[in-house]
Image (cartoon, rainbow, N blue to C red):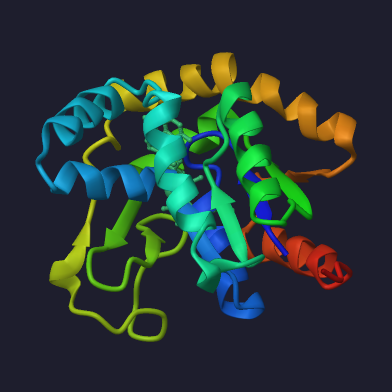
Amino acid sequence: MNLIIFGPPGAGKGTQSNNIVNDFDLKQVSTGDLLRNEIKLKTDQGKNIESIINNGELVPDNVVNVLIEKIISDPNNFNRLIFDGYPRTISQIYTLERILKKFDQKISKVFSLNVDKDIISKRINGRIICAKCFKIFNVYFNPPNSENHECDKKYLKKRVDDNSKTILGRFETYVIKTSPILDYYKKKGSLCEIDGNQKIDEIYNKIRSILGNIRD
Ligand code: AP5
Ligand code: MG
């Protein structure tokens, strides 16, 4: 099955994708991570992406769509992808549908994590990510310890775009540009809205029970 996980910045898309990957043998595709990898390459395109991300805006559809097509066309990924943070515009939805059709696939379920704005700020401010194993932690809500993290503490880093100014921009971009596209999946009947204000495990239990009933 292919899934989409949708939600504002800091909603828990990456956190829940990590859980799903472990239990359902799927592969996570975070366009944010893919774009951050492009930045590391220090190409002209990477520099352009960096300034867009740091302003909390959306990277142009064509740039993101090329990255996505590469992943879907890989036979190793056939019917086992979780799209985390993609699509974010109606044009990205149409592109995703076109590519999936080309490779004889579809989306089984779209999860949308609904989280209040004040909770989002605290989650993003407290987020730390391991640069080695890529696990996501939170100094307030989910701190790393010897039981949940094996790598050295020196690998734990904050994301460059996790600062108060960019967070506001990211949230605004989500409300104006991305949240309206949820209607598309609502009309299709594939949308499942989840209260993302709850604890990580509570949210995941809901997702897991829904996924357990999907047979494709
Ligand atoms: P992206 O990296 O996708 O950032 P985002 O959408 O802002 O979402 P985040 O990654 O910040 O949050 P998350 O929902 O994954 O939360 P997480 O699980 O980490 O995109 C970055 C940028 O790239 C965009 O701004 C844009 O510029 C560009 N971009 C990306 N995709 C694009 C696209 N398709 N088109 C165009 N441009 C694109 O959790 C956050 C924190 O909260 C963690 O610390 C976690 O431990 C904690 N936490 C999670 N769940 C809970 C919970 N239930 N209770 C308590 N704490 C929790
Ligand atoms: Mg994320």
Residue depicted at x 61% and y 44%:
99
Residue 103 in the image: state x and y as whole percent. Answer: 64, 55
Q: Position of residue 71 (x, y in %)?
A: 47, 56
Q: Does residue 126 show up?
A: no
Viewer-proximal residue among 119 and 93: 93
- The quarter in which the N terminus is drawn is bottom right
**Height in image: 127 above or below 21?**
above
> Which image quadrant for residue 23?
bottom right
Q: Position of residue 175 (x, y in %)?
A: 58, 19
The mark tally for this picture is 0
Query: Where does the image place residue 154, in percent across and percent down from the top left?
Result: 13, 69
What residue is rendered at 43% in x and 52% in y? Answer: 70
Where does the C terminus fall, quadrant-wise? bottom right
Give the residue at the far front of this rendering.
102
Q: Residue at x 53, y 37 (%)?
A: 119
Q: Nearer the viewer, residue 147 or 46?
A: 46
189 w.r.t. 100: above or below: above
Q: Residue at x 64, y 32 (%)?
A: 93
Left or right: 77, with 153 as reference point:
right
Residue 4's place in the image compared with 214, above or below, is: above
Q: In screen coordinates, is 74 left or right of 46?
A: right
- For ligand 1, the image quadrant comes to top left
